């Protein structure tokens, strides 16, 4: 019990202390190494949560089956991204896009962001969760604008304004949840503690809860990147440093999704409240279809994959909106697979853009010839993200589609249509990127392939064989999600 | 006494909505900033009144933050920025004043209908507070979408945030209100610094930041 609360404390303390140290230390090699070390120890602390006994849920912090999945995934991708970031940033320093002063800032912000995301996951207090998500957002805004080019600033500004509006709506929803809890639980701290809220949600005023959920879904949905509130996402992905695109897609969207899921559970605990399912299904399908169409018109490689993230978040929200053990299981699996695959793709894309000196798809051709490792890495990644067997995303998409066919065949039609549309767009772009007459610089890439291939190996393994305990775990969490 | 408490809270919250309306038709930046300062003063009074009737001394902190930070520091800072950027004369609204006011009325009606209907069980003071707060939030959003100028968008966002503080203080005994208002103040400080440092004028339509870097010799 004691060791467990220590582990939770480490998950939060390591990043925040590392941020303070990294902000003060000069030198690229040292700070990049420290960044990796801090991320690695946070990952270890997160892993230790799997084996030791859970702490009792307190007024602020909570560890349960649901958030452990998120924490472990978060710290793992945080670790691999820090490895990737070390080689990526070295190149940026050489070309002078980043100055040493900004590098210090970058590393400190990276750790503050990890702190914010971890805090959002372990918080048991809906107010604290809101603050944590705000911290994570704010740090990513700063990092998106770090190149200070015209486009980067515009992207950061757009992200900032839309993110702030989203966060404001989410806060209003949080206040409404508190108001709903007030007559039942009474004034004070308890009425914002998630575990207390869920245990007594059945007696809350359903009308107030409904309105609260709509605000929360719109607010946090903005951060998930659901259409029509996604406008910030492609810009923020395209203009910031690629490690940030990787964590944005792989992690930050999950944080917001996690918040939506928490409130969905809360709403499901009240029998008279509206069912959140149809709302989420609608938003999910809209995002999927919209992003699938938008994929065709992309000229920028990072924007292409940003739209693909919107598409996949749409699929995940759709799956959770369908609900039920199977769809929730598939949604959870899809979320994990998407995080791993998409960040892996961004690792590849980051190095590709550096080698070629451009993000324009038209200027990148024949990667498999000039840079076999990067090219084939991208091929594996895109094949995975497009949902081809035997990789993990195929399995989760298959589960989502088959469970939808079994329960709501009519909904399955737009779902499959969207999936095929996105598949077509991705394959179309992939063929020109990876094959054909090479175009652009053929200089060898100084890349770290380990993070990328580690991710793809995990996705491949999951596609072929999911370990029994993991399946049991996910099934249990899927039941929790209702 | 209770009735008086209720009336004053009502008056202040209603005043906030009214001032939000006044923001909608300001066509000069300085005037907009002055109106925003008035908005913040009324918010501070309203929060202080809530602190008094709820016997919640910590809310006075929020009131002081609203008064010092939002009613004085931020408007003064924005005044200086506007002067330095030389944009004190222009403010174009994307939509005309008439349609904007009509939309604003629609939003207020919407929030009244919505909040009064769903909060039937809640205590009347909190209930009306919440309805007013949602009106302020929506009007803030309206200011943000009808302006193209970065400074007035920031003002819109801050008035939106004032609505949230009103809602949070109206919810009796809500924990973390002070922390949240501090968090928001930090957020706003970041925006204002951002606007200042990067000379963000009109959502980047005209300002050329690259030229600025060239000028400072930072261009590679």
Image: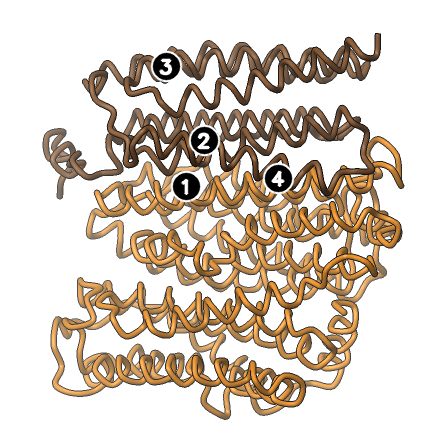
Q: At 43% from the left edge and 71% from the top edge, which residue is drawn?
A: A344
Tell me which numbered mark, 2 or 3, is placed earlier along the sequence: 3
On the same chain, marks 4 and 1? The answer is yes
Residue topped by disc 3: B77
| Foreground residue among B186 and A227 | A227
Q: Position of residue B207 (x, y in %)?
A: 17, 34
The residue at 23%/63% (across/down) is: A354
B152 up-or-down from A321: above or below: above
Q: Is residue A163 left or right of residue A12?
A: left
Q: Is residue A416 visible?
A: yes
Mark 1 or 2: in front is 2
Look at the picture and state if A23 lies above or below A80.
above
Residue A86 visible here: no
Respond whether the residues carrying marks 4 and 3 are from the same subunit: no
Tell me the shade of chain B.
Answer: brown
Disc nearest the viewer among 4 and 3: 4
Mark 3 Cα-neighbour bin, 10 Å: few <14, some 14–19, many ≥20: some
Relative depth, front residue between A229 and A370: A229
Label 2, residues with CA under 10 Å away: few <14, some 14-19, many ≥20:
many
Which one is earlier in the sequence, the residue at label 4 or at label 1? 1
Q: Is residue A458 found left or right of A387 in the rendered image? A: right
Q: Report the Cα–Cα distance between label 4 and label 1.
A: 16 Å
Secondary structure beneath label 4: helix
Gap between marks 3 and 1, in whole Å? 20 Å
Which tag is nearer the camera, tag 4 or tag 1? Answer: 4
- The residue that label 4 is drawn on is A171
Chain A's colour is orange
Splitting the image into 4 quarters, where does residue B208 fall? top left
Q: CA distance from mark 1 to mark 2?
A: 11 Å
- Chain of the residue displaying label 2: B
Residue at the disc numbered 2: B157
């Amino acid at each position: 019990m004691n060791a467990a609360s220590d582990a939770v404390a480490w998950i939060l303390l390591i990043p925040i202390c590392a941020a303070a140290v990294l902000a003060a230390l000069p030198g690229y090699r040292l700070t990049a190494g420290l960044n990796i070390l801090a991320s690695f120890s946070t990952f270890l602390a997160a892993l230790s949560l799997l084996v030791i006994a859970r702490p009792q849920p307190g007024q602020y912090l909570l560890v349960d089956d649901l958030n452990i999945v998120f924490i472990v995934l978060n710290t793992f991708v945080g670790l691999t991204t820090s490895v990737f970031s070390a080689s990526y940033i070295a190149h940026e320093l050489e070309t002078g896009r980043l100055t040493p002063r900004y590098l210090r800032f970058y590393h400190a912000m990276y750790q503050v962001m990890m702190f914010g995301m971890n805090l959002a996951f372990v918080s048991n207090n809906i107010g604290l969760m809101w603050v944590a998500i705000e911290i994570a957002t704010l740090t990513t805004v700063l990092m998106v604008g770090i190149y200070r080019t015209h486009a980067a600033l515009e992207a950061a500004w757009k992200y900032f304004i839309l993110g702030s509006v989203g966060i404001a709506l989410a806060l209003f929803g949080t206040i409404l949840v508190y108001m709903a809890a007030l007559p039942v639980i009474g004034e004070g701290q308890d009425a914002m503690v998630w575990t207390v809220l869920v245990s007594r949600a059945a007696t809350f005023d359903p009308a107030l809860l409904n309105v609260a959920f709509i605000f929360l879904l719109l607010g946090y949905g903005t951060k998930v990147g659901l259409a029509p509130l996604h406008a910030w996402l492609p810009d923020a992905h395209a203009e910031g440093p690629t490690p940030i695109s990787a964590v944005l897609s792989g992690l930050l969207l999950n944080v917001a999704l996690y918040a939506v899921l928490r409130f969905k559970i809360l709403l499901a605990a009240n029998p008279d409240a509206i069912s959140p399912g149809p709302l989420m299904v609608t938003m999910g399908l809209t995002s999927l279809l919209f992003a699938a169409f938008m994929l065709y018109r992309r000229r920028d490689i990072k924007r292409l994959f940003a739209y693909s993230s919107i598409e996949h978040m749409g699929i995940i929200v759709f799956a959770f909106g369908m609900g039920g053990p199977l769809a929730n299981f598939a949604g959870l699996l899809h979320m994990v697979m998407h995080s791993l695959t998409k960040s892996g793709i961004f690792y590849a894309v980051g190095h590709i853009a550096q080698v070629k000196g451009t993000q324009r798809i038209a200027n990148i051709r024949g990667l498999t010839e000039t840079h076999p490792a990067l090219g084939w890495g991208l091929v594996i990644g895109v094949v995975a993200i497009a949902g081809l067997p035997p990789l993990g995303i195929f399995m989760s998409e298959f589960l989502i589609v088959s469970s939808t066919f079994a329960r709501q065949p009519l909904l399955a039609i737009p779902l499959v249509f969207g999936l095929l549309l996105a598949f077509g767009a991705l394959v179309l772009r992939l063929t020109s990127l990876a094959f054909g007459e090479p175009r652009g610089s053929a200089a060898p890439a100084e890349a770290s392939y380990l993070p990328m291939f580690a991710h793809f190996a995990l996705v491949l393994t999951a596609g072929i064989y999911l370990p029994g305990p993991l399946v049991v775990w996910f099934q249990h969490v899927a039941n929790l999600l209702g | 006494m209770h009735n008086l408490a209720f009336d004053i809270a009502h008056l202040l919250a209603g005043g906030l909505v009214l001032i939000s309306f006044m923001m909608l038709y300001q066509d000069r930046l300085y005037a907009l900033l002055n109106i925003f300062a008035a908005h913040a003063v009324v918010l501070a009074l309203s929060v202080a009144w809530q602190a008094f009737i709820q016997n919640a001394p910590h809310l006075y902190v929020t009131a002081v933050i609203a008064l010092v930070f939002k009613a004085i520091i931020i408007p003064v800072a924005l005044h200086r920025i506007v002067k330095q950027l030389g944009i004190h004369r222009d403010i174009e609204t994307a939509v005309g004043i008439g349609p904007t006011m009509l939309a604003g009325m629609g939003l207020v009606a919407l929030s009244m209908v919505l909040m009064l209907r769903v909060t039937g069980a809640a205590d009347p003071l909190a209930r009306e507070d919440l309805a007013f707060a949602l009106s302020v939030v929506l009007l803030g959003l309206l200011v943000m979408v009808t302006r193209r100028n970065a400074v007035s968008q920031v003002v819109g966002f801050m008035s939106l945030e004032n609505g949230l503080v009103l809602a949070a203080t109206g919810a009796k005994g809500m924990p973390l209100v002070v922390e949240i208002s501090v968090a928001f103040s930090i957020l706003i400080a970041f925006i204002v610094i951002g606007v200042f440092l990067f000379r963000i004028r009109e959502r980047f339509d005209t300002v050329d930041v690259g030229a600025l870097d060239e000028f400072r010799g930072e261009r590679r």
